[in-house]
Image (cartoon, helix red, strand yellow):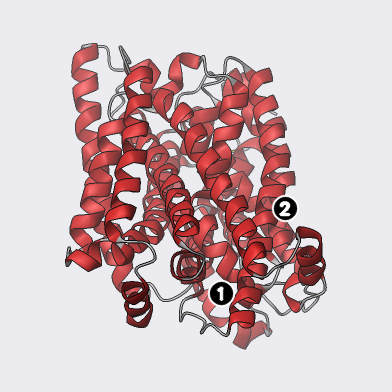
Amino acid sequence: MLSQKYNNKRKKKQILTPQLILFSFLAYTLLLFMITWVTARKAGNEAFYRGNKSSPWYVIAYGMIGASLSGVTFMSVPGWVKDTQFTYLMVVFGYFFGYLIIANVLMPMYYRLNLTSIYTYLEQRFGFWSYKTGAFFFILSRVIGASFRMFLVVNVLQVFIFDAWNIPFGFTVSMFILLIILYTLKGGIKTIIWTDTLQTTFMLGALVLTIVFILNQLNLGFGEMFNNVINSDYSKVINTDWGSKRHFFKQFLSGIFITIVMTGLDQEMMQKNLSCRNLKDAKKNMFTFSIVLVFVNMLFLFLGAILLMYVNTKGITMPERTDDLFSIISINYLGPIAGLVFVIGLISAAYPSADGALTSLTTSFCIDFLGLEKNKHFSEKKKINIRYYVHIGFALLLLLVIVIFRAINDRAVIDKLFTVAGYTYGPLLGLYAFGLFTKLNVKDKFVPLIAIISPIICFILSENSQKWFNISIGFELLIINGLITFIGLLIIYKKTIPKNEILKN
């Protein structure tokens, strides 16, 4: 939470009034609703789930930048430079290779099987309980992850707008989620493909313009500032301490697997790729997106370094939470235009954190747990009504988790996000790896037990690794979790192989 002294300074300077911020938020939201009106007309379940498989690949590639970065990257990565320098860049390099694996291993399978929910693969490969286990862990992961992302953004809106009017946080986040419901309820993925494009544009524009504003205040050219950053302590990329969480190889390897599970095994991200016309277009999307994303992350790290240099040059006190650095400097020190640019960029980062998550959660629950896609007894209208109820139910769940998270948050959100992902996505990694790279089948009814035991073992290892092995476990927790799940599946394997030949390697 932003400290009270920054609120007081903002009130005193009146650089950017709550009224102006609120107006910007409402104007941006109105623009989203205009796009929704155009894209969601006559949209049925097929449009909601798969965008009628007619989405242009280049639109998806561009929009996925904003969806992948979200409010976490926008707010957390720049401030994270203070504690981790540029070591996160090794994770980003890992992302690139992870996307190549997704494009050449996972997406061909998804298209070959014509999947709507990617977790139906597990049912065809292993059976009922494996399928439900995979879908459950996705829902758990996405609810927590989306809540983390939304919290970070809504909290800033709360501090800089609604605290001034004594409006409680619960009301603020309720209104935000209500807006998300209204513009995603009907169009689903068909709408999100286009709204993500708008949001990516504003978010990247805010990033570039903020750098320009800081350079102007410091009377520095881009080349001079670039040299200052490169020659500073902040630019450290390689950490060679094997016992550290930030060891470069651990970071790189973790980046590969984080991408595989948080994109390739994630219904939200794959749902967008599966809305392409064909596999060829989906691969174009993934290759283009993966290259651009590396450079965008570099820009966010560069922004973090110059924000810190700005703080040191101006003698500004660092906020207690590094996540607050970007917002405090933009709104309190760079002038009203810069503050407004930041707010619009923040809002642009907020919506992709919520809309895609809500749509994918609805899709997964409706297909994986309610079986609506295969249900022959319900009319199309009844299926749509059920989908509406599920959509609203998940929105209320996200609201509850955000409020709880605000009460317990104590460190950089991006750090916490990847830590939680290590526990919740690990079983998915193990299940898919076992299905893709072995021809063995498993005793399906024991799969949920393996998926629960593995994160428990990982938690024990993480809490005691320093004492037992003199090593700190960082993001590689995900890999360890997947490996333990894989070993557990080997223990419960059975000799028969899958009947469905299309699923064999």
Q: How many marks?
A: 2
- Judging by the rendered image, the residue that carries numbered circle 1 is 461
Q: Position of residue 61 (x, y in %)?
A: 61, 31
| Residue 238 can be seen in this image | no
- Residue at image position (46%, 70%) is 328
- Residue at image position (72%, 33%) is 287
Position of the N terminus by quadrant: bottom left
Q: Mark 2: which secondary structure?
A: helix
**176 sits to left or right of 144:** left
Q: What's the residue type where badge 2 is placed?
A: Gly
Q: Quadrant of residue 462?
A: bottom right
What is the spatial separation of the Cα atoms under label 2 and label 1, in whole angstroms? 24 Å
Q: Residue furthest bottom?
A: 467
**243 sits to left or right of 261:** right
Q: Mark 1: which secondary structure?
A: helix
Q: Nearer the viewer, residue 358 or 70?
A: 70
Q: Position of residue 6 (x, y in %)?
A: 38, 77
Q: Nearer the viewer, residue 51 or 16?
A: 16
- Judging by the rendered image, the residue that carries numbered circle 2 is 94
Neighbours of disc 1 within 10 Å: few (<14), some (14-19), many (20+): some
- Residue at image position (67%, 83%) is 469
